[in-house]
Amino acid sequence: MSTISESELLAQVPTQLYINGQWVDAEGGKTVAVHDPATGAVLKNIADASPADGMKALDAAVAAQDAWAATPPRVRSDILRKAFDRVQELKNEFALLMTLEMGKPLAEAIGEVNYGSEFLRWFSEEAVRITGRYGTNPEGTGRTIVTHMPVGPSYLITPWNFPLAMATRKIAPALAAGCTVVVKPATLTPLTTLYFVKILEEVGVPAGVVNVFTTSTTAAVSDPIVTDKRLRKLSFTGSTGVGQSLMKLATENMLRTSMELGGNAPFLVFEDADLDKAVDGVMIAKFRNIGQACTAANRVIVHEAVAEQFAKKVTERVKAMKIGRGTEEGVSIGPLIDEKAVAKANELVQDAVAKGATVLTGGKAIDCAGTFYEPTVLTGVKPGADIMTEEIFGPVLSITTFSTEEEGIKIANDTEYGLIGYVYTEDFQRGQRLIEKLQTGMMGLNAGVISNASAPFGGVKMSGLGREGGFEGINEYLSVKYTMTPNP
Ligand code: NAD
C-alpha cells in the first residue's frame, strides 16, 4: 500500500484548468469546492471555468487537431502505453484520491484503477490497427478505397461515479484515433481527472491535444462548446435526462454522439440457479460502488420457488457489511455522493414500503457528518413501486418474484432502459434464450460484474447509443471515408 498521506496526495493534485498545455486559473480566479462525502470536509478548491475559459479549451483542441491526426499511430500508441504504466505505478495514489472524493471503499478503488487504466493499454494497441480496405468494384470499372479518419475535436463529459474509468474510457480511444479532446469531469469528483491529466502531460501528450475544465455553471459553459461548428464529436456519460438535452443541442451541427446513460438492470434468478453463486453475484452487482453504478442490479427478480431462501441468504450477507469511510479497513459500504442521493434512496424505500414491500434489513439514512445510507434489503416489492422504474443509485436491494420464464422476461423488459441484465441459471439453453430475449446492450450470464476494456460497453433504448471499449470503442472516434477511383 502507498505510504503517501492524504494531505501529501491532495497537495500533488492540480487545481487549475489545463488548456493548451498550460495550467491556468479560471477567469477572475473563481473556484469551487470539492468535498469528501464521508466527512463533508472540503478536500480542495478547484478552478471554476467561465464560458470564455471553456471556449479557450475548444480553441486549443481545434488548433492541435491536424498535427495530432498526422502523428504516426505508433507515437500515439506509445504515449498511451506510457500513461498506462504510469497510472499502474501510481495505483495507490489514484485509488486513494477516488476514495477521498467519491467515497468508494479503497479495495474497489484499486479495482477501478486496474479497470480504468486498462483502456489506456487496450487503445494503445488499437491505435496501430486502424485500417481501411481496397478492392475492385463488382462491375470491374474502378477501385474502391475505404479509409478511417479521426472524427475531429471531441468533447467528453464524464459522471462522478467512476472518476478514472469514465475518463480513460473516452480519452484513450479518442487519442488513439487521432482526435484532440476537451474533457469536462463532474464537478463533484474532478480531482482524479486532473491528476490523470498531469500524467498525460508527463508522458508527452502535446499541448492542445487534451484540455480540461471544471465548472459549477455547467450548461452556460458547455452549451456554446456543443453548438460550436468546429466541434465534431460529443461523448457523454451521465443521466438520461441530461443526455437527451445534449442530443438535442448536438443536432444543430450534426455532431457524432455517444451516449452512455442510465440503467434499470434486472437481475433474474431462476429456480435452477446455483443460489450461492447468485448471492455472490448480486452482492457485487448491487453493492459495488455503494450501488451507484449504471450497471447496478436495480430490480432483483427471483423465481418464487427460491425467493425466500435467496432473500434470507442475501440478508445475512448484507447485515455483515461494514459501513464507514472508504479508507477504513474492511469497509464495503461508503457514503453516497451527496445529501440528494440519500434523500432519493430514502424516498424510494418509503414509497416501496407504502406500496406493500417489507424491509428485511436497513431502510434508513445514518445520522452523521457524511452522507451514508444503510445497506437495505426489500422483499415483496410490487410492480407499482417507483423503485421498479427509477434508478436507485444507492445500496438498496429490491426483490420481486416471478413464476414462469415468460413472466420473468416480461418483468425484466418492462422498463424504458436497456443497459444490462443479469441472469442466473444452470440451464445453458435457457441462458441462450435470455441472451436473445433480454432487451439490453449487455448481459451477465452467471456473472455479477461484466466491465472489461476489451468488451463493447453500452446500452439500447433509453440507456443510450454507442459503445465504449472493445474493437468497437475506437470506431466512435473515426469516420469512414470512401473514395472511388478508375482502374489504374
Ligand atoms: P449527470 O447527468 O447529472 O452528470 C453527468 C455529467 O454531465 C457531469 O459531468 C455533469 O456535470 C454534466 N452535466 C450535467 N448537466 C449538464 C449540461 N446541461 N450540459 C453539459 N453537461 C452537463 O449524471 P451523474 O449524476 O453525474 O451520473 C449518474 C448517471 O450517470 C446515472 O444515471 C448513471 O446511470 C449514469 N452512468 C451511465 C454510465 C454508462 O456507461 N451507461 C456509466 C456511469 C454512469
Image (cartoon, helix red, strand yellow):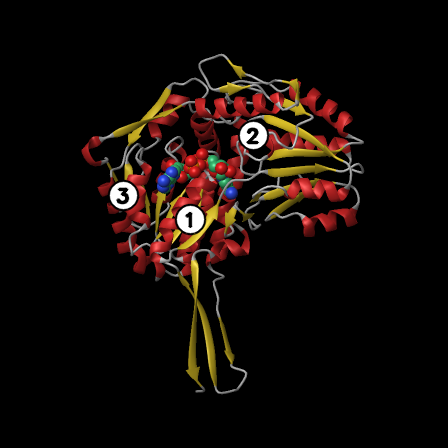
Q: Quadrant of the C terminus?
A: bottom left
Query: Mark 1 — residue?
Result: 235
Q: Mark 1 or mark 3: which comes first in sequence?
A: 3
Dot 3 beta carbon under 8 Å from ligand 1: no
Query: Which residue is at a point 44% across and 14% down the rendered structure image?
Result: 369
Place of residue 54 in the rendered image (x, y in percent of width and height, measured from the top left): 27, 43
Please tell me in which quarter of the rendered image ligand 1 is found.
Answer: top left
Q: Determine the image quadrant of residue 271.
A: top right
- In front: 165, or 255? 255
- Residue 410, placed above or below residue 153: above
Query: Mark 3 — residue?
Result: 54
- Label 1 sits on a secondary structure element that is strand
Q: Dot 1: within a 10 Å radius of its alpha carbon, few (fewer than 14), some, or many (20 or more) residues? A: many
The answer to whether residue 185 shows anywhere in this view is no
Q: Dot 3: within a 10 Å radius of its alpha carbon, few (fewer than 14), some, or many (20 or more) residues? A: many
Q: Report the amino acid beneath label 2.
A: Gly
**Separation (CA) of disc 2 from disc 3:** 32 Å
Q: Report the amino acid beneath label 3.
A: Gly
Q: Mark 2 or mark 1: which comes first in sequence?
A: 1
Query: Mark 2 — residue?
Result: 291
The answer to whether residue 475 shows anywhere in this view is yes
Place of residue 308 in the rendered image (x, y in percent of width and height, measured from the top left): 76, 25
- Residue 252, placed above or below residue 1: below
Q: Determine the image quadrant of residue 270.
A: top right
Query: Which residue is at a point 43% across and 44% down the rendered structure image?
Result: 243
Q: Report the amino acid beneath label 1.
A: Ser
- In front: 110, or 281? 281
Place of residue 265 in the rendered image (x, y in percent of width and height, measured from the top left): 61, 39
**Separation (CA) of disc 2 from disc 1:** 24 Å
**Separation (CA) of disc 1 from disc 3:** 16 Å
Place of residue 39 in the rendered image (x, y in percent of width and height, measured from the top left): 43, 17
